[in-house]
Amino acid sequence: MTNVVFSSYNFKVKEPDNKKVIFDIARKKWVALTPEEWVRQHILHYLIYDKKYPQSLIAVERGIELNGLQKRFDLVVFTNTGKPKMIIECKAPEEPLNEKVFEQIARYNLSLKVDYLWVTNGALNFVSRLTGGIQLLESVPDWPDFANQI
């Protein structure tokens, strides 16, 4: 398992019409605050504020085509040249990180061909580097280290 310690982030949350929403700093809009979204926002803030990843190089919930089907990834980190470098699959805290989740992120990687895969439910984190095999990382690389591996 990969060690991830979240800081205390300054999330913007409100409750119009008795439905909680959170402001997504990447998409620059209010989105429904589901358990999965709570995890996604923690990962996004962790990358930007703790690991110093440039916000401009992180895509949130965008579509990709897989075998003629439209799918949506949670987060993808790109290099400075626009190449996908890491896929992050977020699940709600109560969801188990089972074989089905790892197969899902592996399918996304058939299209994106990244070097890093991260599966999380907020409490459990598995970050792997694909270097001829699968290397489970003890921690998420800081941006300078991550960027220098390009």
Image (tube, rainbow, N blue to C red):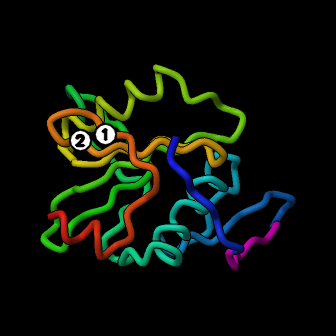
Residue in the picture at 37% in, 63% down: 141
Mark 2 or 1: the one toward you: 1
SS for callout 1: strand
Q: Position of residue 81 (x, y in %)?
A: 12, 71
Question: Residue 136's image quarter?
Answer: top left
Q: Tell me if label 2 and label 1 are in contact, CB under 8 Å.
A: yes
Q: Which disc, if any, is residue 54?
A: none
Apparent side of residue 33 relative to residue 127 in the rendered image (left or right): right
Q: Identify residue type, mark 2.
A: Leu
In the displayed orientation, state which residue is furthest to the top.
Answer: 99
Q: Position of residue 82 (x, y in %)?
A: 16, 66
Dot 2 corresponds to which residue? 130
Question: Residue 66's image quarter?
Answer: top left
SS for callout 2: strand
Q: Position of residue 55 (x, y in %)?
A: 39, 76
Magenta: main secondary structure equals: loop
Q: Nearer the viewer, residue 140 or 47?
A: 140
**Above or below for 34 versus 25:** above
Give the CA distance from mark 2 to mark 1: 6 Å
| The magenta stretch spans residue 69 | no
**Above or below for 77 versus 1:** below
Q: Identify residue type, mark 1.
A: Gln
Residue in the picture at 38% in, 74% down: 53
Q: Which residues are magenta?
A: 9-15
Instruction: Please tell me how crowded label 2 is: few (under 14), some (14-19), or many (20+) other residues with Cα within 10 Å.
Output: some
In the displayed orientation, state which residue is furthest to the right.
Answer: 18
Dot 1 corresponds to which residue? 135
